[in-house]
Image (cartoon, rainbow, N blue to C red):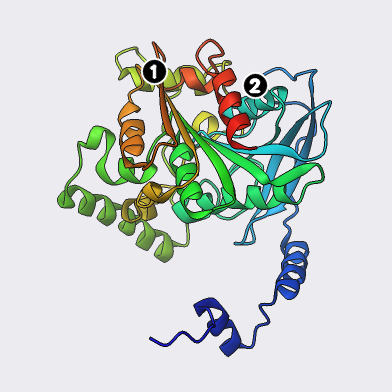
Amino acid sequence: MRNTGLSVIALVCAIAGVDVSADNVGMQSAKQEINNMETLTLTQEWDKIFPKSNNVEHKKVTFVNRYGITLAADMYYPKNAEDGMAAIAVSGPFGAVKEQASGLYAQTMAEHGFVTLAFDPSYTGESGGQPRNVASPDINTEDFSTAVDFLSAQPGVDSGRIGIIGICGFGGMGLNAAAVDTRIKAAAAITMYDMSRVSANGYFDAEDSAAERHKKRETMNAIRTNDAVSGIVTPGTPGLPDSITGSEPQFVQDYFDYYKTPRGFHPRSINSNGAWSPTMTLSFINMPLLSYVGEIERPVMIVHGENAHSLYFAKTAYSKLDGNNKELLIVPGASHTDLYDGLEYIPFDKMAEFFRVNLK
């Protein structure tokens, strides 16, 4: 085919009469962000589950993703911040809020000398988006890239020195973001889930068959039809009970201990105090998140607990990565949730060194 010198995107825009010059795109993006900014109600007092550090500065910020959803975030930076600093965007776990594990990671990495941003994903926490309590492999991947957009524009941040940390389900989302967004210079996936795999195959791949996936699709699509006919949205079922007996699988007990007790409970967290939409996993079933992680050319660090039920996600992701710029760190004795807040388990010093070396 003859090379016309015109990209597919430019050609489509030209046909539509859209000016795609850099200056115009920049102006239009700024205008759209102003026009599309949702009004969010942000809690101004410190309501995190971890104590505030005296060694960092903190402020709440908002920014808009390319789907027009306004995200709420906490920004942390060292008190001795200088120009040209490296920055890290952090999100997760899946169903958590920035006042929980991601905020702890962000604040601690700021203590190690980075500008950091812990954000609530679209449709959850203090971030915008309707309906509430839904997730999307595409939009949540975009949330990471939008965080990179925001950090790139911050005074004092070197836009060429930005990395990401994804925790639990946002570990898989973060790897997907690193595969698509070449501005991400280093990525860490902590106690990760592959949400597309667990949605399609069930835990430990126990439901990995076309027949099982068909049953799931039938159930969720029946709910959609019912909602459309009745005009009433079917509420979800909380993923965790209000109490446990001790006979549940260990990982369920571990989740309960974090999300349902003072250790990690937060009223805005879906896992603590809500429920996902019952049709939320439909898109995850058909959209494998890790399809192109083998094409990530930047360094990747995967950290997982030796005793985590989810370790198989990390091992599979690591096996898909190519080249010699990958690292799998298995923490002895740690469970999945130990890496949410267990300061004796989370290798912050090693993570800080990983980002210092790779965000030069």
Residue 41 showing in the rendered view: no
Residue 274 in the image: x percent, y percent? 52, 36
Q: Is residue 221 depicted above or below 201 in this figure?
A: below
Q: Secondary structure at mark 1?
A: helix
Q: Name the residue carrying label 1.
A: 253
Q: Name the residue carrying label 2.
A: 49
Q: What residue is at 75 percent from the left and 53 percent from the top?
A: 39
Q: Are marks 2 and 1 in contact (CB under 8 Å)?
A: no
Residue 152 in the image: x percent, y percent? 71, 50
Q: Is residue 4 depicted above or below 233 in this figure?
A: below
Residue 213 showing in the rendered view: yes
Residue 181 in the image: x percent, y percent? 54, 53
Q: What residue is at 35 percent from the left and 35 percent from the top?
A: 318
Instruction: Report how far apart the C-alphas of labels 2 and 1 lie in the structure.
Output: 19 Å
Label 2 is placed on what type of residue? Ile
Q: Is residue 346 depicted above or below 133 in this figure?
A: above
